[in-house]
Amino acid sequence: MSNSSSITEFLLLPFADTRELQLLHFTLFLGIYLAALLGNGLILTAVACNPHLHTPMYFFLLNLAFLDLGCISTTVPKAMANSLHDTRAISYAGCVSQVFLFSFLMSAEYFILTIMSYDRYAAICKPLHYGTLLGSRACAQMAAAAWGSGILYAVLHTPNTFSLPLCQGNAVDQFFCEIPQILKISCSRSYLRSFWVLVIGACLASMCFVFILFSYVQIFRAVLRMPSEQGRHKAFSTCLPHLFVVSLFISTAFFAYLKPPSISSPSLDLVVTVLYSVVPPALNPLIYSMRNKDLKTALWKLLTGCV
């Protein structure tokens, strides 16, 4: 039996055995990473520089863009470097950093998405009280609570994960250090020590999910009662991008963490993990700008101004 303190490095899952496929993986991840950097960077710049976008909805979108950049930068660059240099190794400290940062950023992003559903609920169902419910101070407090909760969740999870003795080597069946994969190589009895942390995470995730679901039930009821077709179209255009992002995030993340072991396989785990950790940061800017005229106008002014 070995424990975490005796391990100096972990071995990540290789994407391919041949050099050609490794370079193909590097190129593919590089394209996705650059798209995420460009898209989220444009949203950050457009929202920060355009006074018309200094509203609660875009303030939370700004936070989401920051979290997306951090999330994809935590995992993808190391995977690209490993493919480029034909290696699987990640240092013990690097693995701990990945677990902490990924847990923090993903949980904070989930909390921000929950707050964004409340923002849409207040804007559509409580329009007369919107300024009171989501003033600048309230928005700052909610964003701080989301970031702080993410840090607290990561602080709970990371030491607990790496305090477990590892009985099955140091090979992690994923392209980055993911908590479920590290728990797989821990001793089965010691796994119970992390049970209470998992319960806390599941309770928080379920509460957020129920809140988002309740918010959108109320939103759709309010939208369908609107007499104006133009009003309904405007309401849907601000809600559908967020709903699509939430659905993609929740469905893939929940499947990755809650799928039964009987259907688990390295290839399926890899695909699902890429879908919830790599694809959303690259797609979110496109999703939010596709049906949002104000954001598209700001991005166009930003691009034409740069040119």
Image (spheres, grey):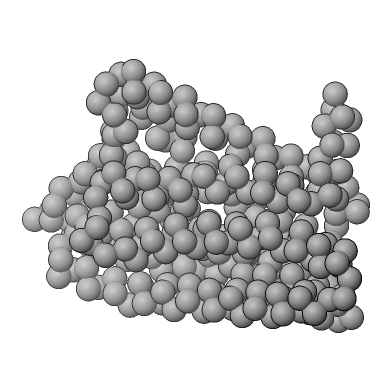
Q: Is residue 105 left or right of residue 177?
A: right
Q: Residue furthest top?
A: 20
Whole-percent x, y for residue 10 in the image: 26, 42
Q: Is residue 105 left or right of residue 179?
A: right
Q: From where the camera sits, is residue 25 visible?
A: yes
Whole-percent x, y for residue 77 in the image: 47, 34
Q: How many marks?
A: 0
Whole-percent x, y for residue 183 in the image: 25, 59
Residue drawn at (40%, 35%) of the image: 79
Q: Residue furthest left?
A: 1
Image position of 101 with respect to 189: above or below? above
Residue drawn at (85%, 43%) of the image: 298
Q: From where the camera sits, is residue 92 visible?
A: no
Quarter of the image where one finds residue 176? top left
The front one of 270 and 164 is: 270
Residue drawn at (55%, 61%) of the image: 247
Whole-percent x, y for residue 88 in the image: 28, 33
The quadrant in which the N terminus is found is bottom left
The front one of 305 and 226 is: 226
Quarter of the image where one finds residue 119? bottom right
Q: Is residue 175 left or right of residue 8?
A: right
Image position of 70 with respect to 132: above or below? above
The quadrant in which the C terminus is found is top right
